[in-house]
Amino acid sequence: MYSLGLAYMNGAGINQDQQKALDLFYKVIQKNDNADASNAAKAAILSLNK
C-alpha cells in the first residue's frame, strides 16, 4: 500500500492523485504493524500537507 501511495503522490506510471495517496498512507498506518512502514507513511503525509 505504501508503494502505491508513493506512485499516486508522484504520478509515477499513474495519474497523480494526492487524495488517493493520503488514503493509502493512512491505511498503512492503521493496518501495518511494521514501524518503518508506518513512519515512512507519516512522513509522506506530512510532506503532502505542506
Image: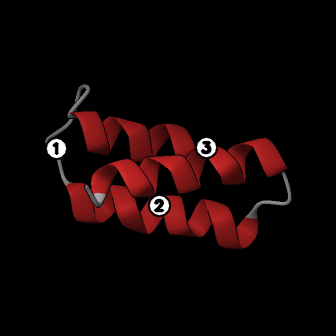
Report the residue at 25% width, 55% height from top: 50
> As shown in the figure, which amino acid type bears the numbered disc 2?
Leu
- Mark 3 packing: few (<14 Cα in 10 Å), some, or many (20+)? some
At mark 1, the secondary structure is: loop
Q: In screen coordinates, is 15 left or right of 45?
A: left
Disc with the residue nearer the chain's start (2 vs 1): 1
Residue with the mark numbered 1? 16
Q: In screen coordinates, is 19 left or right of 45?
A: left
Question: Residue 37, can we see it?
Answer: yes
| Label 3–label 2 contact, CB within 8 A | no
Q: Nearer the viewer, residue 14 or 26?
A: 26
On residue 40, the disc is: 3
Disc with the residue nearer the chain's start (3 vs 1): 1
On residue 24, the disc is: 2
Question: Residue 1, can we see it?
Answer: no
Q: Position of residue 10 (x, y in %)?
A: 25, 34
In space, the residues marked 3 and 2 are separated at their CA atoms by 12 Å
Report the residue at 41% width, 56% height from top: 46
On residue 1, the disc is: none
- Mark 2 packing: few (<14 Cα in 10 Å), some, or many (20+)? many
Q: Position of residue 21 (x, y in %)?
A: 35, 55
Report the residue at 45% width, 47% height from top: 44
Q: Position of residue 18 (x, y in %)?
A: 23, 56
**As drawn, which residue projects farthest toward the left?**
15
At mark 3, the secondary structure is: helix
Q: Position of residue 48 (x, y in %)?
A: 30, 53
Disc with the residue nearer the chain's start (3 vs 2): 2
Q: Which colour assignment does the render follow?
A: secondary structure
> As shown in the figure, which amino acid type bears the numbered disc 1?
Gln
Identify the image quadrant of residue 29: bottom right
